[in-house]
Image: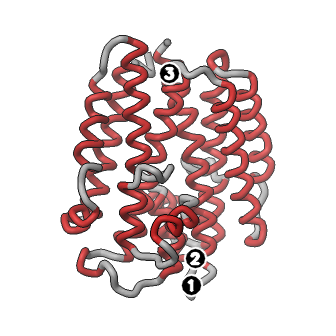
Amino acid sequence: MLGKTAGGLYWMFRYLERSESTARLVAAGQRIALTRSQPDEEWASVLDTTATWEAYVARHGTVRRDTAIRWMLCDRENPSSILSCIEAARANARMVRTALTREVWESVNETWMVLRDALGERLGERDLPAATALVLQRAHQVRGAFAGTMLRNDIFNFARLGTFAERADNTARLLDVKYYVLLPSAQAVGTTIDNVQWESILRSVSAEGAYRMTYGQEVRPRHIAQFLILDPRMPRSLAFAVGKLVDNYGYLARTYGHRMPSHEMTDALRATYLDRSIDTILADGLHEYLQDFLRDLAAIGTQTEQDYRFYA
C-alpha cells in the first residue's frame, strides 16, 4: 500500500474518533455545569481535557459557556472542534476513496453533510443534548459500515490503528484532567468526593452500566481508575486500546513480512504501563503515569508515520 493511502486511512479514523470523544465531553460538561454555581469552571476543565485550552484563551480570553461550546462544536479556528474533525475525516476519506467500500464513503460523506447543517447554527442550551447525540449516532453509523463491509486486510489495520491510538489518547487525557484535579494525592483515595464528577467520567466513555456490572452501585475513584486503565474488557480502557494496537501492528507485520520499530514500541508500551497494579500506579503518581503514557503513545504515532511513509 502507498504510504499516503495508509496515512489517509489512519488519520481519517483518528479524526472520526476525536469527533465522537469531543461530543461525549461536551455532553458530560453540560450535565456537570448544571450542578455548579460557577458553570464556566467546568467548561475550562473540558477545554483542558481536549488540549485546546491555551488556543481557546489566546483567541477568546475568559472561558464562558456559550463561547466554549461553540469552540468545541463548530469553530473552524479550533482544529479539534467536532466540525473541523468531521471535515478532516471526510477530506482523508476522499483522498483514499478507492480503498473504501461504497458504503463507508457514503456514510462518511453523509455524516459530514448532516453535521455541517446541524452544527453550523448557533445551538441553544436545550439543543445541545440532541446535537451531541447526533454526533455519536453518525460516528456509530460510519463504524458499522466499516466493520460490516471492509476486508480484514492492511486497509482495515491502518484504520484500526488510527481509531485506537486516538481512543487511548482521549481516555488518558480525560483521566489525567478529571482524576488529577479532583484527587491530587494517593492519600485521598477513598475519601468522600463529589459523585456527580466521577459519574461524569464514566458517562464520557459510555461506561456507567459496564462499571456497575463490574463493581456495583458505589462509585469509587480507585475502581474507576482500574476500570479505565487496566480492564481489557472495557472498550475505551487503555488496556483495551493498546491491546488492539498490538494486534493490528501484528497483522501488518504478517502482511508485509517484517516488524517495524513502531511494533516494538507498542509492545513496550503495553509491558511498561499495563503490567502494573492500580495501587502501584496510584502510589507512584497517576498524573506522572498518564503524562508518560501520552508521551510514549505520541512517539509511537510519529514512528508509525516514519515506518509506513505516510507523507511519501
Give SS at disc 1. Answer: loop
Q: Amino acid at mark 3?
A: Ala
For label 3, the crowd category at 10 Å Cα-Cα, with few meaning under 14, some 14 to 19 and many 20 or more, is many
Horizontal arrangement in the rendering, residue 279 relative to residue 208 (left or right):
left
Q: Are marks 1 and 3 in contact (CB under 8 Å)?
A: no
Q: Quadrant of the C terminus?
A: top left
Q: Nearer the viewer, residue 236 or 127?
A: 236
Q: Position of residue 183 (x, y in %)?
A: 34, 76
Q: Amino acid at mark 2?
A: Ile
Q: Quadrant of residue 124?
A: bottom right
Horizontal arrangement in the rendering, residue 18 relative to residue 178 (left or right):
right
Q: Nearer the viewer, residue 261 or 242?
A: 242
Reading the image, the residue beneath label 1 is: 36
Reading the image, the residue beneath label 3 is: 6
- When the figure is inspected, residue 25 is found, relative to residue 168, above or below; the finding is below
For the question of whether residue 61 can be seen, the reply is no
Say the numbered circle drawn on residue 186. Answer: none
